[in-house]
């Protein structure tokens, strides 16, 4: 196990973290990476925003 995630690994963990509970080690490595990488932090925010938008759309039935 590598101590530092690459951006590709961080993106994978961010995605997996939306579908399952990450392990303590995975969360720690991800937090460490995000504390040093603005691009991945931005990506994380974008993923959360998209997920929230999709949930809202499904609740509204997609109707406007």
Image (cartoon, rainbow, N blue to C red):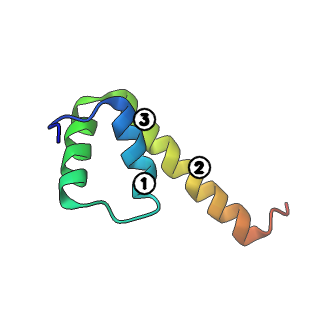
Q: In this view, does 42 lie above or below 25?
A: above
Judged left or right of residue 8, residue 27 is: left
The residue at which mark 3 appears reads as 42
Assign a secondary structure to mark 2: helix
Q: Is residue 47 above or below residue 57?
A: above
Q: How far apart are marks 2 and 1 (CA)?
A: 15 Å
Image point (65%, 58%), residue name: 54
Q: In which quarter of the image is residue 34?
A: top left
Judged left or right of residue 30, residue 61 is: right
Mark found first going from the N terminus, 1 or 3: 1
The residue at which mark 1 appears reads as 16
| Residue 9, position as x, y percentages in the image | 35, 37
| Residue 56, position as x, y percentages in the image | 66, 64
Q: How far apart are marks 3 and 2 (CA)?
A: 12 Å
Q: Quadrant of residue 20?
A: bottom left
What is the quadrant of the C terminus in the image?
bottom right
Disc number for residue 50: 2
| Residue 10, position as x, y percentages in the image | 34, 39
Image point (17%, 42%), residue name: 1
Image point (41%, 43%), residue name: 12
Q: Answer whether labels 3 and 2 touch (C-beta < 8 Å).
A: no
Q: Nearer the viewer, mark 2 or mark 1?
A: 1
Assign a secondary structure to mark 3: helix
């Amino acid at each position: 196990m590598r101590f530092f995630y690459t951006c590709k690994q961080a993106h994978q963990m961010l995605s997996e973290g939306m579908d399952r509970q990450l392990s303590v080690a995975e969360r720690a490595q991800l937090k460490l990476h995000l504390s040093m990488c603005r691009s991945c932090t931005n990506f994380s925010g974008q993923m959360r925003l998209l997920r929230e938008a999709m949930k809202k759309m499904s609740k509204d039935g997609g109707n406007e």
